[in-house]
Amino acid sequence: MVLRWLRTHGHAAAPYGLALAAVIAVPPVLGVIPGVAPGYVLYLVSLGLIYAIVAVGLGILIGHTGQISLGHAGFFAIGAYASALLTLRLGLPFVVAVLVAGSLSAAIGFLLGLPALRLSGPYLAVATLGFGLAIPQLVVWQGSWTGGSSGLHGLPLASLPLGAFTIVFRTDQDSYYLAAAVLIVLTIFARNVVTSHTGRAFVAIRDSEIAARAMGVDPVRYKTTAFALSALYAGIAGALYAHLLHGISPEDFTVLLSVDFLTMIVLGGLGSVGGALSGALLLTFLQNALTRLPVVHDFKNLYIVILGAILILTIAFLPHGLAGVTRSVRQRWAARVRDVGPRGGQIVELGEGSSVG
Amino acid sequence: MSGPLLEITGLTISFGGLVAVDDVDLSVNAGEVVGLIGPNGAGKTTVFNCISRFYDPQRGTIRFKGRDITRARSHEIIRFGIARTFQNVELCRSMTTLQNLLVGEHAVMRGGAIRDGLRLRGVAADEARATARADEMLDVLGLAGHRDRVVSTLPFRLQKLIELGRALVSRPALLLLDEPTAGADQRESQGLADLIRRMRERFDLSVLVVEHDMSFVMGLCDRLYVLDFGRRIAAGAPADVRRDPAVIEAYLGEPELEVADV
């Protein structure tokens, strides 16, 4: 069956196969590059992949449904603390803890989606900001079981029971493969959602809520669904984060992290799953690479200024982000090859109209 | 089914003391094309927005197929079999023509984010069926050539036609058209009237149309209602309504009167 699928879809699947091969090849390739500490780079890549999980989910909410959130670090924290507490205090297996953490976060996302029904734009931004601000404070306040401001440490390793034996994710390489696998699965899920019935309802709400309602789209259902979905992604990512770092503290989940998440999806291009993914990786690398710049005139935070400048230039010249760049390259290529235009209309990314046609 | 398809009685709504629609009765029988006309600000679109349940009327009832829908939710209306277009075109701008028609089929498709995300059994078949229905509608409307174009890049005239297709693709029993001839010239208006007649035959459709263009409604509609300052001032066959002194009074000074006299 796989062979038959490959034969019929082989041409379209080739880029995905190559991408998968590249994902698998990253650790061994890093190992042979001289002067690179593969462990640290892999740790950094894993962090980027985990943030990418949040970005892909947040992209559905902001990019597709048009509902802003400045509070997703709150969901990330909920996922991280839920998973940490379930494994540390209750001794639950990692897999169960991650799933419960994701579900809990999704449930709270659903609840936060309810006030969002009456709010939009800047008002919704402020409301979600309040949520993001409150979560770390609640963690500190409930210090007796959350560890307060010193956090939780010594989390058990991530593990996956497979029948008779169990895979334990010990090394940085293991964590990398775990994060990549979860990201791949959740990216496929997100793509499936946005290219189908549910995704069209999301975009319809973003483009014209009046028309969406007249066509039978229940805004209550779809806005809360989008909130819950994006919170599910952030919650699962938070759980992975906790176990990747083996410890967490409230400082990991400041409002700045929420802003980072927003930056990632804008940088990548709103309304595109691939854009959210690439934006997350790019921002994580930029932030890290720029801290290595030499300190000039005692200005230690010069790198933040440079990062800011990069962001301003990106938004000014690439309003559709990285996704917009790849789209226009693809179109130019298609025009050169004189192909028969986009296929079926089903896979066409529900992105910004102005870049098409 | 006995009685009219759509029956509105005593519809009243006011905004901040201004009575926009005042005790209006209106009905549409199965298979009829009914016009709702009147000068600017007469309350025509407000009536539409009450039927669509975007506005809550203070008094009156709206019955469809004998069922009271006065307090239904706006997204339920299309499931009862009422679809509509908008005066200023409310398409999903970033979507292609095909995707807009698929949104039009939202109410007749099965949903579920988890079902879609996991591509459970039936999703692909549902999508294929919906796409086939949309393609059929695009053929009927002569829009097949614009199928995969993003609608915001298309001219207004085509956008209006796409909106019509989006409303029709769910096969409603009643179609509400809000100023379909806006932006169209005389010849295009005639083409549109022919199209609406064809759609009525083909899809067994009833139509309630809000319009400014008198010659358009005179030629198309079986019956007319005339609103002025929110009140119903006349109702009946187009030929009678045209001669009604109250209607001539209401339209005094409006260019439509001259068109009506042609």
Image (cartoon, grey):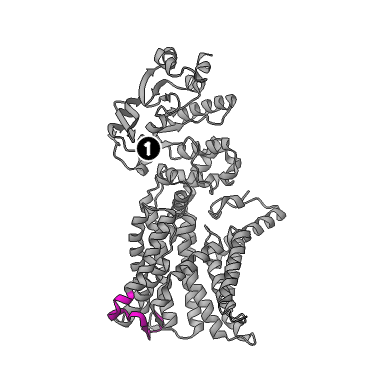
Residue B173 visible in the current orientation = no
Instruction: Out of B65 and B91, give the one closest to the viewer.
Output: B91
Instruction: Out of A183 and A318, give the one closest to the viewer.
Output: A318
Instruction: Out of A227 and A283, give the one closest to the viewer.
Output: A283
Residue B24 visible in the current orientation = yes
Residue lying farthest to the front in this orientation: A297
| A256 w.r.t. B94: above or below | below
Residue B134 is situated, as x and y percent measured from the top left of the image, at 50, 42
Residue B5 is situated, as x and y percent measured from the top left of the image, at 34, 29
Residue that numbered label 1 is attached to: B52
Q: Which residues are magenta?
A: A139-161
> In the shown orientation, is residue A88 left or right of residue B187?
left
| A139 w.r.t. B150: above or below | below
Residue B119 is situated, as x and y percent measured from the top left of the image, at 45, 59
Q: Amino acid at mark 1?
A: Ser
| A284 w.r.t. A319: above or below | below
Instruction: Out of A294 and B170, give the one closest to the viewer.
Output: A294
Image quadrant where residue A69 sits: bottom left
Q: The disc numbered 1 marks a residue on which chain?
A: B
User: Is disc 1 surrounded by few (<14), some (14 to 19) or many (20+) residues within 10 Å?
Assistant: many
Q: Secondary structure at mark 1?
A: loop
> In the shown orientation, is residue A232 left or right of residue B151?
left
> Total of numbered circles in the picture?
1
Q: Residue at x 32, y 38 (%)?
A: B56
> In the shown orientation, is residue B42 left or right of residue B25?
right
User: Is A159 covered by the magenta stretch?
Assistant: yes
| B216 w.r.t. A198: above or below | above
Q: Residue at x 39, y 23 (%)?
A: B228
User: Is B227 covered by the magenta stretch?
Assistant: no
Residue lying farthest to the right in this orientation: A336
Residue A221 is situated, as x and y percent measured from the top left of the image, at 36, 53
Image quadrant where residue A223 sits: bottom left
